[in-house]
Amino acid sequence: MLCVEPVVVYSPDYDLSLWGIERLHPFDGRKFSRAWRETHRVIGDTLARRTIRPPRPAERHELLAIHTEEYLNKLRSPRYLAQVIELPVLAALPMRLLESRVLKPMRLAVMGTMMAAREALRHGVAVNIAGGYHHASREKGEGFCVYADINIAIETLRRSGELIAGQDKVLIIDLDAHQGNGHERISAGDPDIFIFDIYNRDIFPQDREARARIDRAVPLSSGADDETYIGQLRRHLPAVIRAASGAKIALYIAGTDIYERDLLGGLCVSPEGIRARDRIVLEALIAAEIPVAMLTGGGYSRESYRHIANSLCYIFEKWV
């Protein structure tokens, strides 16, 4: 039986802050610290005792486990980074500022995902209050995703021997509102990775080539509500668990952009529906004895942090 002792990976330095410029994008750059504080307000110091902090950002050699040299070099261009982040004003800022205020926090989140994956193997459940950058591929960033933290974490575990390529199965459950085309492209030709993706077919990225890599795809239409979303999840998840039977680890991208008031997700799932989604996924994985690293993914509303905190509180109520 899988022993569950939840661990949270978090740093206040995850927050993205550019003197208010970040507010020009619907992503709340401070939702990470807000989510941690809100969870702490509810459950108290139990959270602090179960929280570990990334000691440093992911380094270049760790990023090169997945990304190309050419791509990492392109990130030194403010103009290119502005395209990836989808915030044109960034093109006018000096690179040293973008490095410290944007790229460094994101590399810290990559380290958080690497740590969460390792902690999940040891403790059953780990949550990185960041990460899930599922649009980043080997040689390209887009959709506010610069680094492919999901695949970097998988490759890091393989290189350390904690996962054995050709033997240990990995399950990616992507329940962000957007199709996870980045990890899908990276995972092409990797039979050890099983991908389950529920997404809004009517919005970005509509990547047909990447879609071919999804093992079980559930494309939804804009406006899908709790009944539709949870119904589809309940319908497909058991088959996913069976197909991934014996998986060494699951990486779960729990995007809160399925929320009914999200500015980009286009779905209509309530706060109660988001919590139900996370409960269903986590309990199914634990019942199947599959360790899970949960990543917070996208969320483009001012309430996103509350949904993250709500699910964290559930995890602590259930397993601590």
Image (cartoon, rainbow, N blue to C red):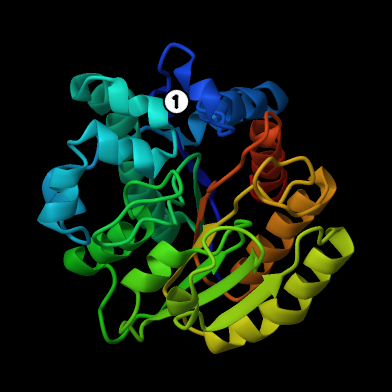
In the rendered structure, which amino acid carries the disc numbered 1?
Asp
Q: Residue at x 61, y 82 (%)?
A: 240
Q: Which residue is drawn at 60% across and 56% down?
A: 176
Q: Which residue is drawn at 64% across and 40% down?
A: 308
Is residue 59 something that shows in the picture?
yes
Residue 71, given in percent of the width and then of the height, sits at 19, 52
The quadrant where residue 148 appears: bottom left
Residue 90, given in percent of the width and then of the height, sits at 35, 26
- Tell me: residue 17, above or below residue 273: above
Residue 50, given in percent of the width and then of the height, sits at 50, 36
- Tell me: residue 71, above or below residue 91: below
Residue 177, given in percent of the width and then of the height, sits at 63, 57
Q: Using the image as rendered, state which of residue 44 and residue 179 is in the foreground.
A: 179
Q: Mark 1 points at which residue?
A: 15
**Secondary structure beneath label 1:** loop
Neighbourhood count class around disc 1 (C-alpha, 10 Å): few under 14, some 14–19, many 20 upward: some
Compared across the picture, whether 35 is left or right of 170 comes to: right
Compared across the picture, whether 198 is left or right of 2 comes to: right
Compared across the picture, whether 263 is left or right of 116 comes to: right
Q: Residue furthest right?
A: 227
**Quadrant where the N terminus is found in the figure:** bottom right
Q: Residue at x 11, y 50 (%)?
A: 61
Q: Using the image as rendered, state which of residue 11 and residue 106 is in the foreground.
A: 106
Numbered circles on residues, count: 1
